[in-house]
Image (spheres, grey):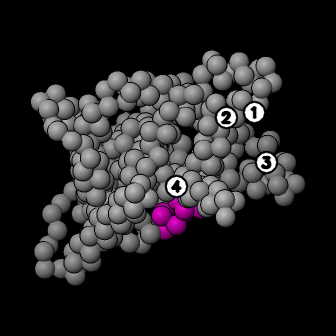
Amino acid sequence: MRIEKSFLHKLGLFFKGLAMGAANKVPGVSGGAVSYVLGFYEELIYSFKKINVKAFKLLVNGRFKSFYTYTNAQFLLLIMSGSMFSYFSISLVLDYFLEHYELYVWSWFFGMIIGSIYYINKDFGKWTKTNLTFLFVGIIIGLAISFLTPAKENDNLWFVFLCGIIGVSGMTLPGLSGSFILILLGNYVLLLVDSVNVLLEVILNALSGNFEIFSDASKMRYIKIISVFTAGSAFGLISISHVLGYVLKHYNKIINALILGFITGSLGIVWPWKKTIYLAENDTFLVDQKGNKIIENYERYFPEILNYETFFAMLCIFFGLGLILVIDKYDRKRKK
């Protein structure tokens, strides 16, 4: 019975990682918000905080079991492996639905974010003037990010490393979408589409025994880019987690108010009724490696009320909201 429970717990962590990873890839959706709602956000932050000088000393001295326990490695490995796996599985399914049922997918996310706002607020307690101030600061920042104009693509490796640090914020700061930040920085397609596709191609070729691909300069350029981006993301995860670990411990209410503000402000990014604006030069749409048009930004509008698409979109919003309420009900039962 204990073995079965342990297996189910590990499987649950892996699937939570899948959900977080899938959310991280979708522009406008925050993986951090998913981790918050699924109840592992603070453990994630504190686990990354444990990757420090003490952990390094344990590793160097060959105390691998102590290192494994100290860093909560099992938890991190399951969450991060689920998150990485989602880039080659769940994310592809999401890409399909975003292409064919875009309005309904965004409506579902919109409902989930509304539910997330309720989920975080329900146990917040008393609202002080300080907490309300940080709530409004978070809302303003979230709204401001929603309407920024994206930059152009930049493959300078130092900038790519910086993109890794900033992009990973979606995992560590609920309400901030790392993917949308990368769109604003101009590098979403380069880092999360083209480079990931090339990496998958290189891995599959290597597994099939075709090593000639390593002599392809254009492919190796993308491998170098994604390696630097990954290094920046790892650095960002650890460094931001150390800061967040401290402030969550000493200013928990203020940070939760700020997070609630971020999530509320991000509703502008995931507003379901929007027209996609694609990047173009000289009246010609630019495309990624797979021939897909590159997203530049979104133009938002209000829907027609008496419309069957609007009706189904509203159903999806309520479905997303209901999903969070079900998770909340399950969480309450589990804690009793």
Q: Name the residue under label 3.
A: 213
For the residues labelled 2 and 4, the Cα–Cα distance comes to 21 Å
For the residues labelled 3 and 4, the Cα–Cα distance comes to 34 Å
For the residues labelled 2 and 1, the Cα–Cα distance comes to 6 Å
Q: Mark 1 points at which residue?
A: 65
Foreground: disc 3 or disc 1: 1
Q: Mark 2 points at which residue?
A: 69
**Is 87 situated left or right of 123 in this image?**
right
**Is 229 situated left or right of 147 in this image?**
right
Name above or below for residue 275 compared with residue 316.
above
Rate crowding at label 3 as few (under 14), some (14 to 19) or many (20 or more) other CA atoms within 10 Å: some
Which comes sooner in the sequence, label 3 or label 1?
Answer: 1
Quadrant into which the N terminus falls: bottom right
Amino acid type of the residue that numbered disc 3 sits on in the rendered structure: Ile
Which comes sooner in the sequence, label 4 or label 1?
Answer: 4
What's the residue at 29%, 53% (across, down)?
A: 119
For the image, the number of numbered tags is: 4
Rate crowding at label 4 as few (under 14), some (14 to 19) or many (20 or more) other CA atoms within 10 Å: many
Name above or below for residue 333 compared with residue 229.
below
Rate crowding at label 1 as few (under 14), some (14 to 19) or many (20 or more) other CA atoms within 10 Å: few
Q: Is mark 2 on a helix, strand or loop?
A: helix
Q: Position of residue 158 (x, y in %)?
A: 54, 24
Q: Mark 4 points at which residue?
A: 16
Amino acid type of the residue that numbered disc 2 sits on in the rendered structure: Thr
* Residue 89 among magenta residues: yes
Q: Where is residue 275 in the image (x, y as percent from the top left)?
A: 27, 60
For the residues labelled 3 and 1, the Cα–Cα distance comes to 38 Å
